Amino acid sequence: MSSPTVSEMEHDEAVLRQMESLHVAVDLIPSSEAFLKAAISLKDQVAQERALPVGPEEGGFGMPYELLHGRAGFLYAALFINKHLGPGSISAELLDPVVEAVLAGGRAGASDNPDCPLMYRWHGTRFWGAAHGLAGILHVLLHFRLNGSDREDVKKTVRYMVQNRFGHSGNYPSSEGNPRDKLVQWSHGAGGVAIMLCKAAQAFPDEREFRDAAIEAGEVAWKRGLNQKVGLADGIAGNAYAFLSLYQLTKEKVYLERAEAFAGYLYHNAFKLVARDQANIGGENTYSLFQGLAGVACLWFDLVTPDSARFPGFEL
């Protein structure tokens, strides 16, 4: 019998994060003590990875490293808990072994590439995007206080991505070595990478190239991000959050105006785009957070207070 997956978007952990949100928002949970005990119990399962084999794709519980189904998602959820229930609710002592496992796995995955310190595989592919690859994992790691070689490896991996983007367009490959310059969305391409680069610019303020690269990725999202999908993961709403991150980083209103422009397009066209998807692939994701109208609603709500806007399940 296989062990349960413990990640941001699946199973027990996802339920815990939603319970925590309800507790913060409407005080539906009288006490957070039981919740924290459950969260720490899940943490203990993941932290045991330190003593387990670490490979480029999986190790310990058959769990990958990426954001939506893996260890990076678990770390994001812990950071989310600490933000809303208070610093140290889940202590650094408990989370550090998981961070170490993610870094060790990235080094193992990059062992055949001397130019890139960290690399990960998901289903055999070395993805670069936010959903399943480097951008999502790095974005989570950038929230931790890394020192020495850990900090340098994260910085050098971000720089590797910037230096190996598509020179003719400024977009980012969906995976290592993939020559197709096609996708501009949060899951794959400049939309999600732009948000990661905004965080990198904050974590490494002396590295001007990260700020410049974030702005360039935002330009790609502006020119090519108005696609035919509505959601956060693959669609217009997700690309709009790249502009909100750039607005918060630069304080330039042009990025807020761009986010509003994408949101306005969704206001007039979202239901048409959803209806087309229903006709083509069925309607099971119509109202989902990452692929449907729930993500669009989050964008509209965040535009009411853009200074505090956060991409759901990604930013903190």
Image: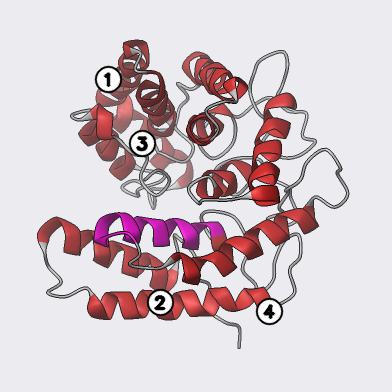
The Cα–Cα distance between marks 1 and 4, rounded to whole angstroms, is: 51 Å
Q: Which residue is mark 1?
A: 264
Disc marking residue 51 = 4
Count of numbered marks: 4
Q: Position of residue 26 (x, y in %)?
A: 11, 59
Q: Which residue is mark 2?
A: 40
Q: Which residue is mark 3?
A: 274
| Residue 84 forms part of the magenta stretch | yes
Number of other residues with Cα within 10 Å of mark 2, as a class: few under 14, some 14 to 19, many 20 or more: some
Kind of residue sitting beneath label 3: Val
Number of other residues with Cα within 10 Å of mark 1, as a class: few under 14, some 14 to 19, many 20 or more: few
**Left or right of 137 in this view: 168:** right
Query: Which residue lies most toward the front here?
Result: 148
Query: What kind of element bears circle 4?
Result: helix
The Cα–Cα distance between marks 2 and 4, rounded to whole angstroms, is: 18 Å
* Mark 4 or 3: the one toward you: 4
194 w.r.t. 84: above or below: above
- Can residue 61 be spotted in the picture? no
* Mark 3 or 1: the one toward you: 1
Query: What kind of element bears circle 1?
Result: helix
The Cα–Cα distance between marks 2 and 3, rounded to whole angstroms, is: 39 Å
The Cα–Cα distance between marks 3 and 1, rounded to whole angstroms, is: 16 Å
The Cα–Cα distance between marks 4 and 3, rounded to whole angstroms, is: 46 Å
